[in-house]
Image (cartoon, helix red, strand yellow):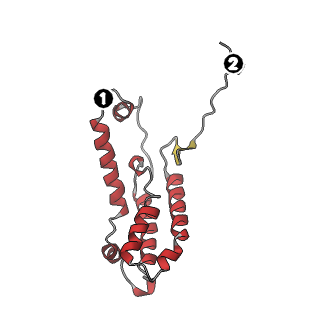
Amino acid sequence: MHWGHRATELEEVQHFKYLGSYISADSNIEKEISTRIGLAAQAFNRLRNVWKSTSLQTKTKLRIYNSNVRSVPLYASETWRMNKKIGSRLKGFEERCLRQISKLRWEQCVTNIKVIRRTGINNIVLEVKQRHWRWLSHVLRINKSRQPQRALRWAPPGKRHREDH
């Protein structure tokens, strides 16, 4: 059957957006991290009245932060290739948010470790690592013929080139 359409070639691209995430040919997630942090910052700023409120307890504000802000940069983090730079950016964003929620100013000289202890929020980098392990555990339990299992065991042909940092 002929539909009247000519077959077209697919364009090769280096990155694209799929289901809200940036996918890169070289597995670089810098753009994804920047986008995620930007979206989380927007969500945080939209809730400015909540953070400034004196009628809400800090515990309530932290629950709102977890559900409405923290979930944004963690979206699809199970598949990220983490490194120190990405971890540092995520931690920096979260520490700024937690300081503002806790109404701490830099002049008060409260360390980031104390801010994390006061708020009871788990380290965001550890959260990403836990998500990696949960995802891997899930993939290992599924049928070996399914795509995630095959992708996990796939070995690219040829030699791997060393990355310079």
**SS at circle 2:** loop
Q: Are marks 1 and 2 in contact (CB under 8 Å)?
A: no
Is 153 or 123 nearer to us in this picture? Answer: 123
Q: Which residue is mark 2?
A: 3
| Image location of residue 10, percent across then percent down | 62, 30
Q: Is residue 15 above or below residue 64?
A: above
Rendered location of residue 159, percent (x, y): 41, 33
Corner quadrant of residue 95: bottom left
Q: Mark 1 sits on what residue? A: 144
Q: Is residue 10 left or right of residue 22?
A: right
- Which of the 4 image quarters holds residue 122? bottom left
Closer to the N terminus: mark 1 or mark 2? 2
In this view, the residue farthest toward the right is 4
- Who is closer to the viewer here, 162 or 9? 9
Mark closer to the observer (1, 2): 2
Relative to residue 85, is residue 110 depicted above or below?
below
Q: Give amino acid for label 2.
A: Trp
Q: CA distance from mark 1 to mark 2?
A: 38 Å
Q: Secondary structure at mark 1?
A: loop
Q: Residue drawn 39% across and 31% down? A: 147
Q: How dense is the environment of label 1, judged by Cα within 10 Å: few (below 14), some, or many (20 and up)? A: few
> Where's residue 142, x and y in %?
30, 34
Q: Amino acid at mark 1?
A: Lys
- In the figure, residue 101 lies in which quadrant? bottom left
Mark 2: give few (<14), some (14-19) or many (20+) Cα within 10 Å. few
**Picture coordinates of residue 121, whole percent (x, y):** 34, 68
Residue at 45% x, 49% y is 164
